[in-house]
Amino acid sequence: MKALLIGESREGKLLEHSYELLGFASRLGAGTAMFLVGSEAALPSYGGTVYLADAAKCGEYNPDLHKRLVLAAVEREKPDYVVFMHSSYGWDLAPRVAVALKAAQVTEVVAVVEGGFERPCCSQKMRHKVNPAGAVAVLTLQVGAFPGEMGAGTPQLQPIDAEGDGRVVFQGYEPAVRKGVDLTKAEVIVSAGRGIGKKENLPVIAELARALRGELGASRPVVDSGWLDAGSQVGTTGQTVSPKLYVACGISGAIQHLAGMKKSGFVVAINKDKEAPIGEVADVLVVADVMQFVPALTAKLAK
Amino acid sequence: MKILVCVKQVPDMESRFRPDTTGVWFAETDLAFRVNEYDEYAIEQAVQLKERLGGEPELTVLSVGPDRVVEAIKKALSMGCDRGVHVLDGSPQLKDPWQIASIIAAYAQGEGFDLVFTGMQSLDRGSAQVGVSLAEILNCACATTIVDFEYGDGTVTVKRELEGGVKGIVRLRLPAVVTCQLGLNQPRYPTLPNIMKAKKKEIRTIPVAELLHEEPRTLLESFYSPAKKGGGIVLEGDLADQVDKLIGILKEKTTVLR
Ligand SMILES: Cc1cc2nc3c(=O)[nH]c(=O)nc-3n(C[C@H](O)[C@H](O)[C@H](O)COP(=O)(O)OP(=O)(O)OC[C@H]3O[C@@H](n4cnc5c(N)ncnc54)[C@H](O)[C@@H]3O)c2cc1C
Ligand SMILES: Nc1ncnc2c1ncn2[C@@H]1O[C@H](COP(=O)(O)O)[C@@H](O)[C@H]1O
């Protein structure tokens, strides 16, 4: 069994999560080759074949061209699996490759289980076991689901090249806006989620943060709705935090939120839904209405 | 200009999910359905574009599913789409994302849409495949996870959201498909007059058999709850009691309460 692993580079650097592809291949017991649109200056620590296209020429984001490059590598390598990370690069490119190969795609694999691949569904609340039909399958892996594994040695390079069609033109990166509080240094963070119901309820959460001498954070919908500014967002597209105490108020626990806070020392979640996925990472799950529980907690702490 | 918006109807995610009799998806009893959150951003963006272009573009909203999805189509019509297409399918959950994409493509092929808006992913299946696969089948440009959209002179400029809040700026030649990310805009609430107006808009029903020409590529095996990893404490019951217990635990297990 052979897997072609699609590595990623951004702004000239190899992305660390590319090593999770190797961890997955070990778990699957597959032989490997890698594919990368990058540069010789930023190769993975890996002893096998790397199909390398030059990012300076091909661009770091040029999906029609990258698809052709992957197809060229597939043609030479004849893998059973073409494996991407479920990242902004992977979820964009994988379906293009799958359709071109007339192959099945399994999205966001979290485990290899008896008789198939396990993937989350229903906003991480449930699991779904699926099996690709056909000779070759495309997979994307949930970031963090498999351990990163570095290989030894230096890769044998196989240069590849292709032409794009100019339908999609990358114009550059826009850096992340960082303003407001630096949550990464906070010892206590109390975060508000959509479960607080409305903007007018925010002061109640802010008061708990004050009572615990902590900072106020938020999940994405709170920021998207304009209740707090972007600097407060915790998660993959916000800040990654590791306070001693993290209190999640009315936050369901989507993977993108968990990725930003799961390194916290102690996690308390307040949620009316006992099955909310936040329960998976919470040291204490308080099953309650957040707008009743939080004021009661703040009042008691003030005593 | 012709614009297509694809919407999926999904259950409320605060529900409890149980396997149905096939064992490969959830039972629908007791579930409340709504428009997939990501698709609300897709509808809003299409309506904003129509408004900006003085009402010229024709906006079609399409959904594949059983009778209940007509509600999702009606919501899109009351937000400002012009006409609805209901691809009537009693069991879309048993089709894989590839089949759903090819059903939509079979409809879109003859229509000559300039722009297609979809959600980045559906909340229930979450394959993040239907939009991109549709673009591939239709052989047109595509960008995913957009958080900013601009149209001018036959091209579209979008910002794609990348990890860590970085964005990638991308220009697309039409025809194009874009998949919409949370926060792209502020989806409007339909007003009562618009809800009334929407009642007069056409919804065409097409049986799925007319559009389905592809076999599945992925086989569904089973649907189940995740294995419980977290051995966390669950506090239920009386509020005052929960407060006291939590403070006790924080005093014992953390150093933050002085
Ligand atoms: C590419 C990508 C990147 C993303 N990046 C991020 C990110 O950086 N950060 C982030 O947070 N999200 C991110 N998201 C969004 C993420 O997938 C979720 O949509 C989001 O985290 C949900 O926020 P929430 O938990 O506040 O809301 P919901 O998922 O709506 O959850 C609300 C919760 O509140 C509970 N609740 C409701 N009412 C009450 C009440 N009265 N009392 C108690 N509990 C109540 C509900 O049971 C539910 O669990 C990203 C998504 C994508 C696709
Ligand atoms: N049954 C459907 N009917 C119409 N559009 C759909 C359907 N399923 C998925 N889509 C569209 O494809 C997007 C991605 O869905 P998915 O690939 O299931 O994550 C959704 O946000 C919708 O815009």
Image: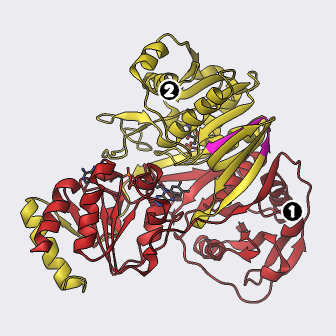
Chain colours: A red, B yellow
Kind of residue indicated by mark 1: Cys
Residue, disc 1: A58
What secondary structure is marked by label 2? helix
Determine crowd level at label 2: few under 14, some 14-19, many 20+ residues with C-alpha closer than 10 A.
many
Q: Is residue B226 left or right of residue A81?
A: left
Q: Please state the horizontal and vertical placement of residue A149, each as a whole percent of the image.
A: 62, 81
Q: Are marks 2 and 1 on the same chain?
A: no
Query: Magenta segment range?
Result: B172-179
- Give percent across and percent down for residue A192: 34, 60
In the image, taking residue A262 as reference, residue B8 lies left or right, namely right
Residue A209 point in image, percent of width and height: 28, 70
Instruction: Please state which of residues A63 and B222 is positioned toward the viewer in this rendering.
Output: A63
The residue shown at (53%, 52%) is A130
A101 relative to A280, above or below: above
Q: Residue furthest bottom?
A: A153
Q: CA distance from mark 2 to mark 1?
A: 41 Å
Residue behind label 1 places its C-beta within 8 angstroms of ligand 1: no
Mark 1: few, some, or many residues within 10 Å (few <14, many ≥20)?
some
Chain identity of mark 1: A
Residue B79, which numbered label?
2
